[in-house]
Amino acid sequence: MKSIRVDPAAGTVRVEGGCTWGDVDHATYPFGLSVPTGFLSTTGVGGLTLGGGLGYLTRRYGLTIDNLLAVDMVLANGRFVTASTEEHKDLFWAVRGGGGNFGVITSFLFQGRPVSTVYGGPMFWEMEDAATVMRAWRDLILNGSHDINGWFGFHTVPPVEMFPAEHHLKKMAVITWCYTGDPTEAEQIFAPIRALAPIAMDFAGPIPLPALQSLFDGLYPPGLQWYWNADFFTELSDEVVDLHIKHAAQLPTVHSTMHLYPINGAAHQVGENDTAWSFREANFAQVIVGVDPDPANNERMIRWSKTYWGALHPYSAGGAYVNMIMDEGQNRIEAAYRSNYPRLAQIKACYDPSNLFRVNQNIKPAMG
């Protein structure tokens, strides 16, 4: 089920459940449209959307679920329904962040946004400048225009042709930018960023949004071993920045990383109880992932990820993005939804009382 229909007059995009975001970008780009999505084009539309949807356009246009108009779905009892703000409103509230707990989505109807070419791409800095850059990025995200976005991360530079050989296998700080404002002002806006500290590698410039969203696909092919730890943060104090620098210096494998994704701006314009996604006051989503093709490295990278997460968790907002947590127990799931969890459990009891859809971050049906 990979059909996509773009309605350029209405600015809407209907996407069937088997599509990836690369499929969506391919269909929308010729019309000068984009649907706010994630950071890799190989990601499936269904999983990312139902968990909330963080991406390059979050500060400008909100989460993916904030651009969702309706879903067609098959319920546990075999019924086919449409959920929107007009019908099955409770179900539509639940699927906007509640994951795959309530049925099988056969198609999504999204509001497209007028974005095609942006000013974006990664900038890399040496680790000795990481603290300076991270603090400046934090302040820009908290106070800057919603047109500017960029995730901050720590990476080991992979030994591939895209990167100069003298930087191969170095641990570096990176910001991958996405600016959706006036393109004639981009160079002026990024001038103070480029003046923060010497940039080791600078790939930022005008780029089609689909190219930006697929830029790192090749670095994370299928079949890698992954171990995830995640949290939300409202603040990133200088103490937190220093802890990040300490643990990032110990990245255990080339693919292992830490990313901080901005989730303020337009995402804050929706109330914490307006959708199932609860953490509308959070400013950052953090993910620490140990990744490697060789299972022999699992113990080392899992230990690093757990230690890193444990050092930062006391400073967190207390919950995490459900698309970035693993099988961590019921308490972590409830913490992700906070006060929205009881309502989700009631809706689950209405639409899936036997908990058929349970191979997920499971919301159990309310009892009685």
Image: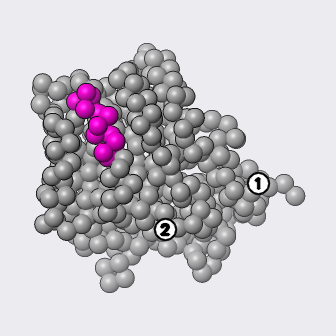
**Which segment did they paint magenta?**
126-137
Residue nearest the observer in this picture, 120 or 238:
238
Q: Which of the image's four quarters has the N terminus? A: bottom left
Label 1: how many residues lie within 10 Å, few (<14), some (14-19) or many (20+)?
many
SS assignment at label 1 = loop
Magenta stretch encompasses residue 129: yes
Closest to the observer, 241 or 23: 241
Measure the C-alpha gap from mark 2 to mark 1.
Answer: 30 Å
The percent coordinates of residue 134 (x first, y second) are: 33, 40
**Label 1 is placed on what type of residue?**
Pro
Q: Amino acid at mark 2?
A: Gln
Does the stretch in magenta take in 288?
Answer: no
Horizontal side of 354 relative to 130 (left or right) equals: right
Q: Which is in the foreground here, disc 2 or disc 1? A: 2
Q: Is 154 positioned to the left or the right of 298 in the image?
A: left
Expressed as whole percent of the image width and height from the top left, the position of residue 204 reads: 17, 49
Work out whether 153 lies above or below 291: below
Which quadrant is the C terminus positioned in?
Answer: bottom right
Q: Residue at x 32, y 59 (%)?
A: 144
Residue 174 in the image: above or below residue 52: above
Q: Residue at x 22, y 35 (%)?
A: 125
Q: Main secondary structure of the magenta part?
A: helix
Q: Which residue is mark 1?
A: 365
Q: Quadrant of residue 35?
A: bottom left
Would you say residue 187 is visible in this rendering?
yes
Residue 140: mark: none
